Amino acid sequence: MLKTGLILAFLFSIQLLISCTQADKHGNNDAPNPDIKDSTANIIKDNVEEFGTLVRLPYEPEEVTWKETAANPPNSEGAASHNSKKLTAVLRFSKENAKKIIAQAEKIQSSEAASLGTEPWFPAELIAQSQLNGDDILKGASYSAADFYLPPYTDGRVTRIENTDFFVLKLVSR
């Protein structure tokens, strides 16, 4: 009986240790991390409705993943030199809406060839495509992002990744 109790106590301790470790990995603990200067810098989001409050969406995306960061590097005190922010998003639209976005963007300005580096949080399909080239670069056509502007984001570009319906949107606030 004592042996069974010890085994159960041991198994419970292991389970408790594992659950605490998983909470730390997923950021579920409440302890502040002094190494993080900008708490929003590494938060990857995918809520379409929330994203729609930050930018103007000319058409509803089928999926969106984005993050906001400080646009300027921190100064020696750890604060950004300006209050500007940068928003980087990967959006996937239906084929029909992707065509409409391009048609609208070309009315503002013709496209320019573009190459973008991938981020670890990009969709797996885009990361795989960049690795096929062997250089972790995505190629596409870049356009003015004026149709997406919503203050404070009033400058940027949108790039359609070639052979896909994915767009990489990069906006900054001024």
Image: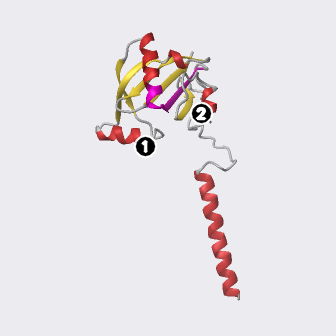
Q: Residue at x 63, y 43 (%)?
A: 33
Q: CA distance from mark 2 to mark 1?
A: 19 Å
Tell me the element at label 2. helix
- Name the residue nearer the viewer: 10 or 155: 155
Q: Name the image quarter holding the N terminus.
A: bottom right
Residue 128, given in percent of the width and then of the height, sits at 36, 42
Image quadrant assignment for residue 80: top right
Say what amino acid the circle numbered 2 marks: Val
Q: Which residue is mark 1?
A: 124
Q: Badge 1, how many Cα within 10 Å: few under 14, some, many 20+?
A: few
Q: Name the image quarter holding the C terminus.
A: top right
Q: Which residue is mark 2?
A: 48
Residue 7, given in percent of the width and then of the height, sits at 64, 80
Determine whether 85 is above or below 90 in the image. Answer: above
Determine whether 84 is above or below 45 in the image. Answer: above
**For the view shown, which residue lies furthest in the front direction?**
96
